[in-house]
Image (cartoon, rainbow, N blue to C red):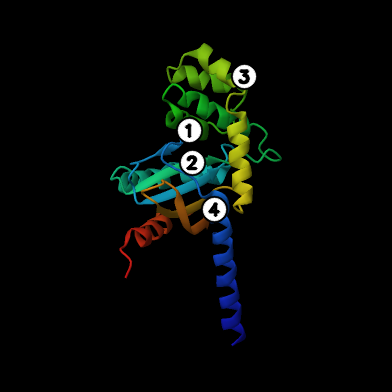
Amino acid sequence: EQDRAQLDDNAARRTMALEQANQELEQAVVVLQSAKGAAEAKVAVIEFTDYQCPFCARHAGATLAAIENDYVQSGKVRYVLRDFPIASIHPQAAKAHQAAYCAGDQGKYWDMHRQLFANQRKLGALDLLGYAQGLGLEAKAFESCMDGGKYAGAVEKAFADGEKGGVTGTPTFFLGLIDPATGTVKVTRRIRGAHPYVVFKEAIESLLRPPT
């Protein structure tokens, strides 16, 4: 009886946490620069990440590639990246997040995303400029974007959104159904940490299944 009560209490707490996350994270996912996948997708996967986080880099490799291949490219999932640079342990991460957005101004957000995770130990200002040039970006426009802090506020807001939604570490994922009328997400599942692809596959499939 005591064990069952504890399980019920834990389930209630998880439900309350998701309800709180919904209040804080409900947002349109269709127009975000850091989103990929069909606008009419049924399911959203929202990842809070940090470019200096080794566990985030692990997810950004084979796991994300499998999700893209099986669900994003087929139009079933809209994948959204949110910024959560933890400055106390990853002092270069915030600028790296800004670099991704500045690259996005020239259509290379996800290309820069891959470069940043592939070079986590080299995220200084000159390194970021080098990656931009390597991607064929117009260097002066990229430098102007970075030096002017064009996306500093956006990164800070994403971090604040994550904190309000209960994010305490990276990577953290929120999964839910997209309202086709508004583009907002009803969060139903939270996954903390880097996990094998099968964990995400099971969670996504459960959302794609018709209600019984």
Task: Tell me the number on the disc at residue 34.
Answer: none
Near mark 1 (Cα within 10 A), the count class, few <14, some 14-19 or many ≥20, is many
Q: Secondary structure at mark 2?
A: strand
In the depicted view, which residue is nearer to us: 8 or 137? 8
Q: Nearer the viewer, mark 1 or mark 2?
A: 2
As drawn, 108 above or below 45: above
User: Which amino acid, mark 4?
Assistant: Gly
Measured as percent of width and height from the top left, residue 200 is found at 42, 55
Going 61% across and 41% down the picture, which residue do you hit?
159
Mark 2–mark 3 distance (CA, rounded to whole Å): 23 Å
Residue 196 in view of the camera: no
Please name the residue that numbered disc 2 is placed on. Answer: 81
Q: Which residue does the numbered mark 1 point to in the structure image? A: 113
Cβ–Cβ under 8 Å for marks 1 and 2: yes
Mark 3 lies on a secondary structure that is loop
Question: What's the amino acid at mark 2?
Answer: Leu
Circles 4 and 1, Cβ within 8 Å, touching? The answer is no
Mark 2 vs mark 4: give the one in front: 2
Location of residue 35 (image quadrant): top left
Label 2 or label 4, whichever comes before in sequence order: 2
Q: Which mark is residue 193?
A: 4
Mark 3 / mark 1, whichever is N-terminal: 1
Nearest the camera: 162 or 172?
A: 162
Of labels 3 and 1, the one closer to you? 3
User: Which of the 4 image quadrants contains residue 175?
Assistant: bottom left
At horizontal 56% and vertical 16% (from top left) the residue drawn is: 143
- Residue 45 position, x and y percent, is 44, 49
Kind of residue indicated by mark 3: Gly
